[in-house]
Amino acid sequence: MSASLGPDPSLGPSPNPTNTKSIRIALIAGEASGDRLAADLVRSIQKKTAGLSFFGMGGESMRAAGVHIEQDFAGLSVVGIVEALWHYRRLRTVLERMKRMLASQRPDLLILVDYAEFNLRLADYAKSIGLKVLFYVSPQLWAWRPSRIHRMVGRIDGMAVLFPFEVPYYQAVGIPVRFIGNPLVDDVRPSGTVEQLRQSFGLGLAKEKPILGLFPGSRESEWRRHMPTLLQLAEQMMAKGVQPVVSVASGLEVDEIEQARRHPGIQWVRGRSVDLMASCDALVVASGTATLEAGLLKIPMVVIYRLSWLSYGLLRLFVHVKDIALVNIVAGRRIVQELIQSLFTLQNLGEETHRLLFDEAYRRTMVEALGDVKESLGEGGASDRLADWVLELVLIPPPRGPSE
């Protein structure tokens, strides 16, 4: 058990198998963020050792990285207790299909990427048939249902966490854990200067007008609950000389997108979310990974979220944190405002967005605090460190560098 970023010496040296082509790794990701993490991990493994094969559940990022996709996760990403119950039958069908896949193909290692409730159930089954299991991205035990950790004891062979404060949870129950760093530190790198990016998006020169990025989320339910208010905000901000730009997640297809695109004066960008964030003076961001991406770019933001009232009421019975935005959780204090549920109104959003765009002292204070968050997440290399652990678990020692 180790909380360090380096190899775990307790595992000892491992023999190098004579035929790496016989080693097969299964990966399970249930939404876009996990798909990207899994794809980056596969590429890191491939750089270190050739010939391994990968298969499982994922999307376009994993497919592009060379993973054979047995099950696409399209339509499986849901948030909220009620929403999960509504999709229960489909989720159950896919879970049973993944169990059959594992039983028939018996991979040397199963890597479960985030998507906690689904993957914890799959971990139970995988261990029951004798598979080795690595969990990548800890369930948010520090936020709600910490008792879930006891389900993992004896069911997973390792937990790779993205935040240092998560390590003690697993150490306390004897689960091998490593803080590998946060992959976003490597991934959140704009492809050009602000001026270049703005020109590539058709947003004009850097100081021509303030640009407000609207990031409603990557799920259909998020789009439908957030966009009506965000469109009203966009119209309000245009009257103040602000250029609103809406981020449309790659792969998101809902009828409301085409309806919303008819609003004059609003620009739309599909994909390239990091580049778009870097192009903006301020952001409105749905709670999730995107808040941490914005934090690493040090772009002032306000965080929003809206669930069904029934789901929200049920979650309040279990959630034990004051803040839900990752940037605030990592900082240990509220540095960006959260407009959640009843607070997510046009008036509140308009007032906070105005401060973000036009109150220079307020902006500067937030940018400095976001810089502290970025520093706390380390220097990058998370996928490479996790790749080394994967190779240890499948009995391939990681290659030594020239200085070793």
Image (tube, rainbow, N blue to C red):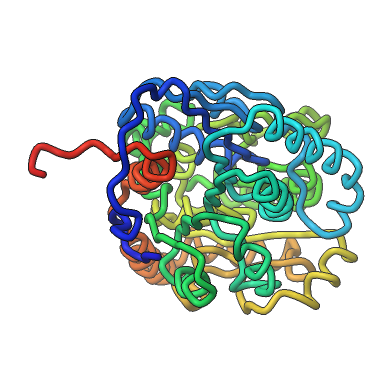
Above or below, 53 against 379 in this view is above
Q: Nearer the viewer, residue 387 or 269?
A: 387
Please give left or right for residue 35 compared with residue 122 in the image: left
Residue 203: x and y in percent read 48, 33
Up the image or down, 308 lies above or below 134; here it is below
Q: How many badges with numbers are in the image?
A: 0
Residue 235 seen in render: no
Q: Is residue 140 visible?
A: yes
Q: Residue at x 75, y 48 (%)?
A: 222
Q: Which percent across, then down, holds residue 116? A: 67, 54
Residue under the image location 34 percent in, 42 percent down: 384
Image quadrant where one finds the N terminus: bottom left
Residue drawn at point x = 52 percent, y = 55 percent: 157
- Judge left or right: residue 91 versus residue 216: right
Which one is nearer the viewer's eye here, 398 or 266? 398
Residue under the point 50% across and 41% down: 37
Say if 380 sits above or below 81 in the image. above
In the image: residue 297, left or right of residue 243: left
